Amino acid sequence: MAVSELDDGVVDAAASGLSETRVPVTQARHMPGYIYTSPEVFRLEKERIFTKDWLCVARVEEIERPGDYLTLRILGEPIILARDDDDDINVFANVCRHRGVEVVRGHGNTSLFSCPYHGWRYDLTGRLTGVAYMAEAEHFDPANCRLKPIRSGVWRGWVFINFDANAEPLEDFVAPLEEDFGILEMDRCRLFAKHQVEIDCNWKFVVENLTDIYHSEVLHAKTFAESIDTEKIVYKLTARGGNSSFYDAAPHNPSGKAIFGKMPWMADQPESFARSGFLAPNFDMFSRIDEAHPVIIWPVSPTKTHILIYQLFPAEFFAINNFEQKAQLYLDYMIDIAEEDREMIESLQNAMDSMLFEPGWMSYLERGVHHVITHYLDRMFPTERA
């Protein structure tokens, strides 16, 4: 359902009762439950946010060789990422131009895509290269038939897409991330592993939780909390509801030591180097002196979210003896932290349908969460309707 098809009363009702959230953080309440449960709000999020902004979708290593492809479904929209013979990454709709069937599923390597329904064939750029029994179709022009292209770009080894042809350039969109995290030189890193998590909650709870420093000392007391002084975190609010945090913390593994040493280009930084941040709407950045572990967040439904945890190391580290065994310690540590969060976030979701829930007042430590939320509200429910 498009925004124009949503009943004005539904939109206005969803926007009501939010005045206590839009005020400064020291006066603000959290958002009411229906923002996290309403199917109408979820549809509006797709129209006003996820089809307008640049979305981080993959690492370049996932489609590293010519012919490699990867399929995704983003809020119901099927897409293909493919690397062609010229080593360019192309992104296009996974929707056959005949009847709309997905021309391929999963991931792999190929020289062409052949629709499994009627055999229409497309190359690695999405161009139609073969079709049978269409000579009599008077208005059909195979030379101008291709899978619908989708805007894409690469920043530091990350592939981004945008459904909006009029959106700002990717370079402008990621500028805050480049300013604060370019130092990590993730384009010189390689993907060690990608861990997938399915969680029964609204996607915004994942974003808020990863931004929230208030809960760390309590929920993560058994993992990383002891190595972070919450009061000394330098917090920077950036464009579009984003943020960057600068602080001291131990490397992200059970030993609290940089097992492989520092990233080669980070030699002048202390071993306690730590940064985290958020680029709206779906990319969270976490890093230490020896690695980076970004997170991509995908809404699935009002009450389900798909999370991808990526583990990156400098390419040089992969040649170290017993690298995989040691690197797995980092990934397992991240998984343990994610599981600590899971129970709490799902409990948050359960409360949203309860008649006993009333949004609580915010702590000043939730200024990052408040920044994310108020930007979200400005995008979703402008104070003055057109």
Image: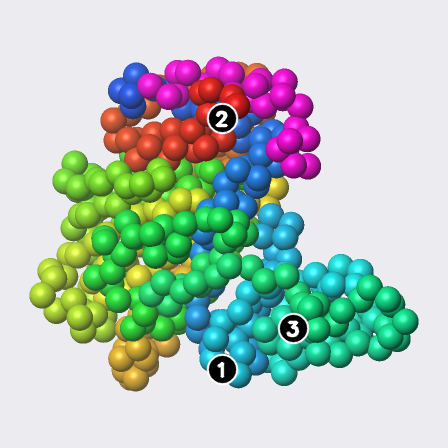
Q: Is residue 20 magenta?
A: yes
Residue beneath disc 2: 381
Label 1 Cα crowd, 10 Å radius (few <14 / some 14-19 / many 20+): few
- Tell me if residue 303 can be seen: no
Q: Which residues are magenta?
A: 1-23
| Residue in view at x 79 percent, y 76 percent | 131
- Mark 1 against mark 2, which lies toward the viewer? 1
For mark 1, what is the residue? Answer: 86
SS at circle 1: loop
Q: Secondary structure at mark 3?
A: loop
Quadrant of the drawing holding the N terminus: top right
Alpha-carbon span between mark 1 and mark 2: 44 Å
Q: Observer-nearest residue: 126 or 70?
A: 126
Residue 150 figure quarter: bottom right
Q: Are marks 2 and 3 in contact (CB under 8 Å)?
A: no
Where residue 84 sits in the image (x, y, percent)?
54, 79
Q: Earlier in the sequence, mark 3 or mark 1?
A: 1
Q: Amino acid at mark 3?
A: Arg
**Residue 51 appears in view:** yes
Instruction: State the residue at coordinates (46%, 37%).
Output: 205
How far apart, in angstroms, are the residues tagged by discs 3 and 1? 15 Å
In the figure, is residue 25 to the left or right of 70?
left
